[in-house]
Image (cartoon, helix red, strand yellow):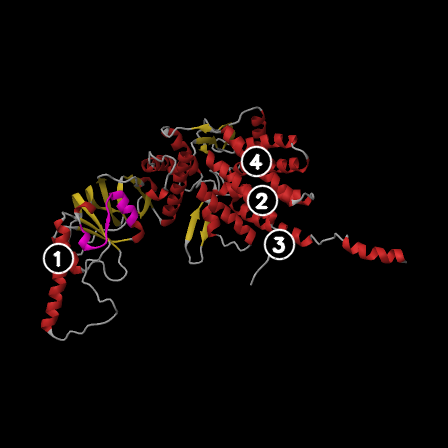
Amino acid sequence: MALIANSAPRSSKTESYVDNKRKEDIRHANIKSACAVADAVRTSLGPKGMDKMISTANGEVIITNDGATILNKMEVLQPAAKMLVELSKSQDAAAGDGTTTVVVIAGSLLKQCLTLLSSGIHPTVISDSLHKASIKAVDVLTAMAVPLELTDRESLVKSASTSLNSKVVSQYSSLLAPLAVDAVLSVVDPEQPDLVDLRDIKIVKKLGGTVDDTEMVRGLVFDKKVSHAAGGPTRVENAKIAVIQFQISPPKTDIEQSIVVSDYAQMDRILKEERNYILGMIKKIRATGCNVLLIQKSILRDAVTDLSLHYLAKAKILVIKDVERDEIEFITKTLNCLPIANIEHFKEEKLGYADLVEEVSLGDGKIVKITGIKDMGRNTCVLVRGSNMLVLDEAERSLHDALCVIRCLVNKQFLIAGGGAPEIELSRQLGAWAKVLHGMEGYCVKAFAEALEVIPYTLAENAGLNPITIVTELRNRHAQGEINAGINVRKGQITNILEENVVQPLLVSTSAITLAAECVRMLLKIDDIVTVR
């Protein structure tokens, strides 16, 4: 009896049973919901991928193939699934392309993690192995990459057109790819060659025409017409351009109040004063030889009145009004001039110079072009045309992806084959590496290697080929040492992808692998969801 009494309290100390069921359920639910998000965009991977039609709450319709856009517009409520949306955003920021790829890889890794977890492997072990495998994967990819010179324009165009091939506007890739290359190369600063700011490339969308009419303009384009109110000029050669941030209109009182004038003589005096005030401003502007005015949009009062437009037209000054506040920096940088905040500071040295400012009719609207700018900054404009808004928006997104691809190549000058070749090669080399590792790590790395086969598998599936046959054949080719063998979607067979000009920047692949692995590791570490009201 005494024995039993002694052992009773001791057993409560060594009690090690903890209910792990809830933790497993949470992990399971997280992984399942994240996989559902990945499966939603999986069909839009690759050149033969399908497009998604997104209908927003306010009745707007978007047709797109871009993973980041699809996920961004989806209303994802589950917190773990939201992480995949953030993942595609960070890939968009880091590389600009491969937004669908990164989500599909993450989804595939999560499926493999489910299998490993159900085998009883601890999440931390899986997480650490994933980290090691992703570092190894980056080394393998870097070893496969082909160095590239920025002077090699042809290779740059190839990689831009590979990026465009999976988009809705893929038939225009022969026009948009060289355009993207020229646009990026024109804003690269030779003193800091690895820094490209895409904000230096302004994309102006104009309805009408087809995507074929898209052009790059060395200068400035405004999607607005010249103020015609008083019959001012619409074309000015040898232009002296001022960007002004003050209003050419009669001043208002500082506080909201009304002045009642009952005497006609007094009214006449007010109108005379207004006229003299405006005329005085315009004389100062004319004295510097300025003949083109860009006027910033004003919130407090009208930037220009009919009276001031009349006098400006008489002075033969071309006026473009309602310039957005956030465009001012781009405009002044391009024109190499300074914004003028007050009429007293209106000096000739603050003006910009251009050969020609003219209004051009396009479709049903008009645009203003400024060309031949003297000492132009490293900026450029791309005028995108399209038959309807859906095509226009998609063309802009596709062009943005192509610009990002060229930016990646400028930052990290290495090319890598496309068409599922790097993923299969990674899968093969990581599989071989897994055999060398001891214990659980080997298992986890092997699962990681298998997960990467989802890319070639999905490419084949979306192209209507037999995925199992294609992936098996691919493995076989890579085992024989053909590193650049990949899926040629157009011919429906396996060829050397580098010879077919299907190339992508190294940065896109490496950032996709590292970001996906990071996201999966984060999800694995979560074992409970706490809602705070």
For the C terminus, give its image quadrant.
bottom right
Identify the residue position indicated by label 3 in the image: 528
Q: Position of residue 339 (x, y in %)?
A: 24, 50
Determine if residue 421 is in view.
no
Mark closer to the observer (1, 4): 1
Quickly name the residue at label 2. Answer: 521
CA distance separating discs 3 and 2: 15 Å
Residue bearing the label numbered 4? 467
Foreground: 314 or 123? 123
Category of crowding for the residue at label 2, using alpha-carbon neighbours closer than 10 angstroms: few (below 14), some (14–19), many (at least 20) = many
**Magenta residues (range):** 328-346
Give the answer, above or below, for where 177 lies relative to 483: below
Quadrant placement of the N terminus: bottom right
Local packing at callout 3 (Cα closer than 10 Å; few below 14, some 14-19, many 20+) is few
Mark 4 or mark 2: which is in front? 2
Residue type beneath disc 3: Asp
Task: Give the mark nearer the N terminus: 4 vs 2.
Answer: 4
Say which of 137 and 167 sits in front. Answer: 137
How far across and how far down the image is residue 112, in percent?
62, 41
The amino acid pointed to by label 4 is Pro
Dot 3 or dot 2: first in sequence order is 2
- The first of marks 3 and 1 along the sequence is 1
Q: Please name the residue shown 36% across and 41% down the image.
A: 197
**Which residue, given by chain and number where applicable, does mark 1 sit on?**
280
Depth check: give the residue in front, 485 or 347.
347
Is 429 covered by the magenta stretch? no
| Disc 1/disc 4 C-alpha distance (Å) | 77 Å
Element assignment for label 4: helix
Residue type beneath disc 1: Gly
| Residue type highlighted by circle 2 | Arg
SS for callout 2: helix
